Image (cartoon, helix red, strand yellow):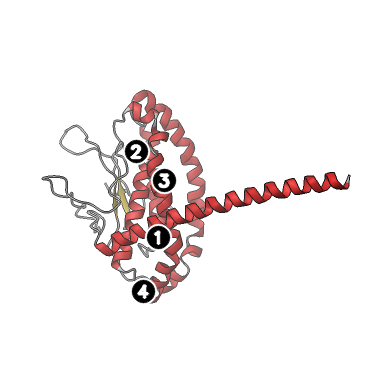
Amino acid sequence: MTTAWNPRPPEGGHPQAEHLPELDVPPPDRQRRWTVLLRFLLLLPQFIVTAVLGIAAFFVTIVGWFAALFTGRLPAGVADFLGGYLAYETRVTASALLLVDRYPPFSFEGQGHPVRIELRPGELNRLAVLFRFVLMIPAAIVTTVLQYGLAVVCWVFWLITLVLGRMPGPVFSAVAAVVRYRMRYQAYTMMLTSAYPKRLFGDGPPAGQPLPPAPATVPSATRPLLLGTPAKALLVLFLVLGVLCGGASQTVQIRQGRWGHLDDNGAATASIRTS
C-alpha cells in the first residue's frame, strides 16, 4: 500500500498471526538548523490538530471497544480512523523529537513522508478486550516513565542536533525506541493489535528465525531496530530519570497537600481565637 499504514493481513491466504506493529524511520541525516531551532513553534498547528483528533480518537476507541467485545474485531471504519490517526500522530511525534527534518503533512495517509507505521488489525480475544484497560496498565507505566525521562534530557539532544546539524546515532536509536514502544502501546490500547507492547531494547531474532526486513520501498533504520550499548544505556537513563521525576512529583504533591491542610487548620484556629 502507498498509505502511511498497512491494514492488510499477510498474503497467501494463511491465518493471520499476532502482528507486532512496526515503525519505519529513515536513518539519521542532515537537518536544517533553523528548523531544529524553531521545531516546536513550527509544529504548533500540528499539536493543536493532534489534540483535537486525540479527543475524537478517545470516543472512537470506546465505540470500538464495545464492538470488539461482541464481534471479536474492530469495525473497518473504526480501524481505519484509529490507524490513520495513530500514523499521523506518530509522524508529528517523530518530527518533534528530531528523528526527521521533513514537516509532517496534515493528512492521515501522509503520502511520501518517510515516517510510516505498519498495522494489521485482525481478530481479537474477547476476554483480552474486556480487560484491556487493566492489561495495558504495565505498558502505560513504562510509557509514562520513558516520556518523563526523555523530557528531562530532550533539551540536551536538541542542543546537540542544533550544533551538529544532525542527531548522533545512539541518540537517534534510543529516541526511536521510545517512539516505537509508545506507538505499540497506543495501538494496543486502541485494539489495533492483539500484540502486547514489547522489545523496548531493540529487536532480536526469534529462535531459529531471521528478523523481518523492512519493505524494499521504505528505507528504514528501525526495522529491525538494533540498539548498541550506548543507545541501551540512554534508555536505562530515561527509565531512571522518569522514575525519579515521577517520585519527585508525587512528593511535591503530598507536601503541598499537607501544607494546604496545615494552612486550613491554622486559619480555622485563628478564626476561633479571634471570635
Badge 1 or badge 4: first in the primary sequence: 1
Q: Closer to the N terminus: mark 4 or mark 2?
A: 4
Label 3 crowd bin: few (<14), some (14–19), many (20+), radius 10 Å: few
Mark seen at residue 192: 2
- Viewer-proximal residue, 102 or 200? 200
Picture layout, residue 94 above or below residue 273: below
What element does badge 3 sit on? helix
Give how far apart the Cα atoms at labels 3 and 1 are: 24 Å
Report the residue at 31% width, 52% height from top.
116
Do the residues under discs 4 and 2 have CB atoms within 8 angstroms? no
* Nearest to the observer: residue 164 or residue 201: 201
Residue type, label 4? Gly
| Mark 4 element type | loop
Q: Which numbered disc, 1 or 2, marks the residue that appears first in the sequence?
A: 1
Disc with the residue nearer the chain's start (2 vs 3): 3
> Which disc is residue 165 wearing?
4
Of badges 2 and 3, the one in the foreground is 3
Which of the two discs, 3 and 1, labels the residue nearer the N terminus?
1
- Name the residue located 28 percent from the left edge and 64 percent from the top edge: 230
Label 3 vs 4, first from the N-terminus = 3
Which kind of residue does numbered mark 1 sit on?
Answer: Ser
Task: Label 2, secondary structure: give it.
Answer: loop
Q: Which mark is residue 141?
A: 3
Relative to 268, 140 lies left or right: left
The amino acid sitting under disc 3 is: Ile
Write down the quadrant of residue 82 in the picture: top left
Quarter location, residue 133: top left
Report x, y in % for residue 126.
Answer: 34, 26
Q: Which mark is residue 95?
A: 1
Mark 4 surroundings within 10 Å by alpha-carbon count, few (fewer than 14), some (14 through 19), many (20 or more):
some
